[in-house]
Amino acid sequence: MSFDSSNPLYLHPSDHPGMILVSKFFGGTRFGAWKRAMMIALSAKNKLGFINNTLTMPNNEQQMVVWQHFNDMVISRIFITLTRDISDSVLYAETAQILWNELNSRYGQANGANFYQL
């Protein structure tokens, strides 16, 4: 099975699980900046669909194996930018979308008390 580079299921020869896509590491603060940087990086790699539910798991077994490979690649790229405590807390997320949603629900909420103080 071959894919052209515009297909989300295309892996460039220089891509690998340890590749750091963003220079911003997330340790529990400045989630918005980290999230934006990660979304830009995933979009540039044409992998945004794995976190925004536009590229869902296929029903075909052969395609599912390929999809899982890329899903795991996206998960590894997110994990490599998280501190150990945070990555340990979301280690068992089965898909990149579940991982992304979990991080959003934990850290994406604005703190109303802090805004009120300003």
Image (cartoon, rainbow, N blue to C red):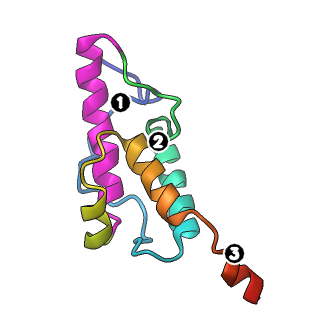
Q: Specify the amino acid type for callout 3.
A: Gly
Residue 1 visible within the image? no
Mark 3, residue position? 112
- How busy is the neighbourhood of tag 3: few (under 14 within 10 Å), some, or many (20 plus)? few
Secondary structure at numbered mark 1: loop
Above or below for 64 versus 40 = above
Q: Position of residue 22 (x, y in %)?
A: 43, 63
Q: Specify the amino acid type for callout 2.
A: Ile
Q: Position of residue 74 (x, y in %)?
A: 34, 45
Q: Return the disc, 3 or 1, that comes first in the chain's sequence.
A: 1
- Look at 33% across and 61% down and name the residue there: 20
38 displayed left or right of 75: right
Q: Quadrant of residue 79?
A: bottom left
- Look at 29% across and 62% down and name the residue there: 89
Give the extent of the magenta segment: 59-82
- Marks 1 and 2 sit apart, C-alpha to C-alpha, by 16 Å
7 displayed left or right of 81: right
65 displayed left or right of 37: left
Q: Position of residue 44 (x, y in %)?
A: 50, 46
Above or below for 78 versus 83 = above
Q: Residue furthest front?
A: 113
Q: Specify the amino acid type for callout 1.
A: Tyr
Mark 1, residue position? 10
- How busy is the neighbourhood of tag 2: few (under 14 within 10 Å), some, or many (20 plus)? many
The secondary structure making up most of the magenta span is: helix
Above or below for 52 versus 25 = above
